[in-house]
């Protein structure tokens, strides 16, 4: 399978605490993305990265920050978790070539109580 | 505003039936349209379509894109219970690289 892993797989946290999700790839791909998936909304883009230290916001970026200090790692941080951030979070990667597809990680199920 | 709309949102069929899933889009600077299958975990890639009228096939699944009318269909023939899943349609734009997803079609195949 494509070399993309997410950690943790599951997490329960309390409202107001900071949370960091990690996406790690071994494909040396330039592009990395964080999506959240909620019933009735499909997959929505939170943030994406087009290189080390190069990131940009997606459609649902409020309350989230990201960092990419190395090609292989893309971190998503919830500075102060809220119940509305309970969701399944997916990381995805894409290669540089025009026809390259997008490969998804297995997801992190986050519950904020 | 860019959007991707899938229909129907859900579908129940019997094993052996043929189904057609629809995806329409309004996206600036279109590059490609992708179909994914999701079974309670990560979406898995099915097809990427970039040119109109060229059918892509993989076993019992096939898909085609119409760039004039801005839609794509995903056909599944002789459905099996293992086809039960959420089917996601997504569009990639030129320059911008993130996928824009539809809400998905939930397909249930009963035996």
Image (cartoon, rainbow, N blue to C red):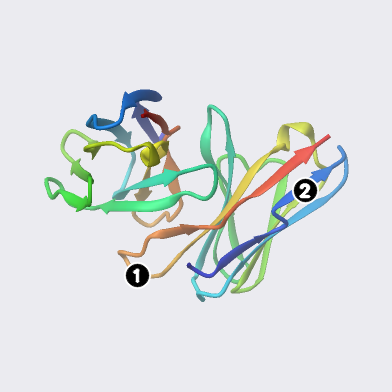
On the image, the x and y values in percent for residue B34 come to: 33, 48
Q: Nearer the viewer, residue A65 or A29?
A: A29
Give the crowd class for mark 2: few <14, some 14-19, many >=20 residues within 10 Å.
some
The residue to which callout 2 is attached is A11
Q: Is residue A47 left or right of residue B106?
A: right
Give the crowd class for mark 1: few <14, some 14-19, many >=20 residues within 10 Å.
few
Determine the residue positioned at 32% across, 25% down: B13
Q: Nearer the viewer, residue B108 or B94?
A: B108
Q: Which mark is residue B77?
A: none
Q: Is residue B10 above or below residue A32?
A: above
Q: Quadrant of residue B78?
A: top left
Determine the residue positioned at 37% across, 50% down: B92
Q: Nearer the viewer, residue B62 or B4?
A: B62
Q: Chain of mark 1?
A: A
Q: Which mark is residue A97?
A: 1
Determine the residue positioned at 69% across, 54% down: A9
Q: Is residue A97 above or below residue B49?
A: below
């Amino acid at each position: 399978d494509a070399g993309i892993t997410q950690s943790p797989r599951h997490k329960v946290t309390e409202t107001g605490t900071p949370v960091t999700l990690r996406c790690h790839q071994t494909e040396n791909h330039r592009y990395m993305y964080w999506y959240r998936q909620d019933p009735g909304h499909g997959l929505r883009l939170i943030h994406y990265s087009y290189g080390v230290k190069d990131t940009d916001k997606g459609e649902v970026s409020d309350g989230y920050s990201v960092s990419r200090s190395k090609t292989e790692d893309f971190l998503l941080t919830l500075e102060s978790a809220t119940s509305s951030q309970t969701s399944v979070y997916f990381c995805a990667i894409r290669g540089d070539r025009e026809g390259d597809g997008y490969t998804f990680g297995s997801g992190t199920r986050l519950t904020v109580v | 505003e860019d959007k991707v709309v899938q229909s129907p949102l859900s579908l129940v069929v019997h094993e052996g039936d043929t189904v057609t899933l629809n995806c329409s889009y309004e996206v600036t600077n279109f590059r490609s349209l992708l179909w994914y299958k999701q079974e309670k975990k990560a979406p898995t890639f099915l097809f990427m379509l970039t040119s109109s009228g060229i059918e892509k096939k993989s076993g019992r699944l096939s898909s085609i894109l119409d760039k004039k009318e801005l839609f794509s269909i995903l056909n599944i023939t002789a459905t099996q219970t293992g086809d039960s899943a959420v089917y996601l349609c997504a569009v990639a734009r030129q320059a911008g690289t993130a996928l824009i997803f539809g809400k998905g079609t939930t397909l249930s195949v009963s035996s």
